[in-house]
Image (cartoon, rainbow, N blue to C red):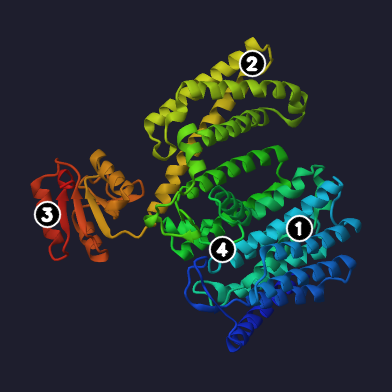
Amino acid sequence: MKYLVCFALSLTISLMATPLVRALALRQKNLYKGDAERWSGRYVSRSGGIAIFAAIILPVSFLVPLSLNFVVLILAALAVFLLGLVDDLVGLRPYVKLIGQLVASSVLVSVWINTGLLSDIRGPVFYFVYIIWITGMTNAFNLLDNMDGLAAGIALITSLFLFAYNYLVDPGNHLAAMLPLALGGATLGFLKYNSKPAKIYMGDCGSLTLGFLMSICAIANTTRTTAATANTMFIMLVPVLILAVPIFDTTFVMILRKLNKISIFQGGSDHTSHRVVRLGLSEKKAVIFFYAISAFFGVLGIVAITAPYPYLYIVVGISFILLVMFGVFLGKLKVYRTGENGVLIKKEEGNGHGMPLLTELLYKRQFLEVLIDFFLIFLSYLSAFYLLYDKDHITADKDLIIRSLPVIVLVKLMVFYFTHIYRGIWQYIGYNDLKKLFNATVISSAVAAFAIKFAGGMDISYKIFLIDWMVFFLLAEITRSMEKTFSNFFDSHLDKEKSVLIYGAGDKGVMVLHELRGDKLLSCKVDGFIDDDPGKQGKTIDGVRIISSGRELSLVLKEKRIDEIIISSARVSDAAVRTVELLCAGYNVLIRRVNKLVS
């Protein structure tokens, strides 16, 4: 009941305080004109962090028993809040804000370790890990606040998962459970006024405070998690999963700016959220897209509490690889202009140098593809043991696994090299590429089994190699298809100039579909296939519905603005074409055959 009261109080205070703060800011003309980072030319108050801070601190102060740990937390959060507020009002240099954050986090970590609230099982090493974690997450949320509703919504989602995590680990730690609930209530109330089009921004005083307190929520139960799992890696694994979106965005921006020799401290529209908008999503859809990713990793983090850690690491490893592939896909967008650091341009105007180093690795040396396969080989081989044997058996075979692992990695990579697997371009993967991949994985598994069992004399079951092959082929196929999947997903959300129907749902019709989707200069959106075969009608091809040339076509023409109908096959009779022409009469629809498209 106390937890529900905490959330309700935070929500109520936030709903009441946010419009009040906005009104005061408008009266005092404390306004901010959105720049390229936020893509807004409107004047909006950026003092929403004041309402957020009040909505967090007041309920927690009322409901959590007074203690040294709590007092230090409030003072440290107040220091970070004031640091952000001064920056919003008069501006501070990045190193000044960084020094303030380091001091606040150092004091809090020192007190909490001495009182036993934080685990110190690694001594001074963990002291610095905590400080880096807190400071990193504080700035991660600051960087994430680059689109209306994004930072507040991600904070709401992660805070609810952090509450679930802390409550499941230690229901008696009221501070660890209350704090994320207060964060959730405060951000939910603020989100009403911050969703696009935002009436108020949270400013640095809000984003820095959210990041600081969120990082504290993530580590407030490290002593209990260590005792429960006897696994120090678990201490940071769950928080990293729950806070995956801000961590991913910050890491992505830092790497890209480092490669392009741009300061990591300046603002800019080169964040992951901005890039998915340039790929075709609206700002609202982009925000929801990252909400979904945050929720997925939040669920994964909660599952991690009870899941056996070997299986967890395998799932996390796969998720991490997919996240890396998504980052590589986004990184190919050229958003930086040569010689103009931080000046960002639209995708279609891109003539900058983009990512020369990453491009070199991807298309010339294929370094990243080899690295991904290395991790997949490692994951699939370990997965084979965990799927076949119990924990005791694996422990007994630990030395055998360690000795055989380098052999299987070396053999598979060498076979992949000699079978020219790394000459393909993943973005255009097709049947022949998958066939070649299938053959290469079969050969590599067979050679590895021979090298380990006969040449190496290691007693490992053939079932291990069979399971390893199946898992590895599946993972390799998924990772190689992801870039094409990402591309198709975002292409389907691009604003197209022309709406097209394709007459003929056969092989040539599918070829026309792929050509229209692949050539962005055509700017066509395929809204359906037309086919007279009753067995095909109502079904879909690559997400596109097949309709008849009769009543269904008439309804589509009435409901949608169709610009063209493309006859994909010469087998479509002139009589069928005339029927379609009659149905299209009065709708100003152009009808063309595929062999006339070039002209």
Question: What residue would you read off at disc 1?
Answer: 166
Q: Could you tell which of marks 4 and 1 lies nearer the N-terminus?
A: 1
Answer whether residue 289 is visible to the viewer in this image: no
| Residue 443 percent coordinates (x, y) | 50, 19
Element on which disc 1 rests: helix
Can you say whether 48 is above or below 407 in the image?
below
| Contact check, label 2 and label 3, Cβ < 8 Å | no
Q: Could you tell which of marks 4 and 3 lies nearer the N-terminus?
A: 4
| Contact check, label 1 and label 2, Cβ < 8 Å | no
- The residue lying furthest to the bottom in this view is 27
Element on which disc 3 rests: helix
Question: What residue would you read off at disc 2?
Answer: 452
Identify which amino acid the numbered label 1 is placed on. Asn
Question: What residue would you read off at disc 3?
Answer: 579
Q: In which quarter of the view is residue 514 placed?
A: top left
Q: Could you tell which of marks 4 and 2 lies nearer the N-terminus?
A: 4
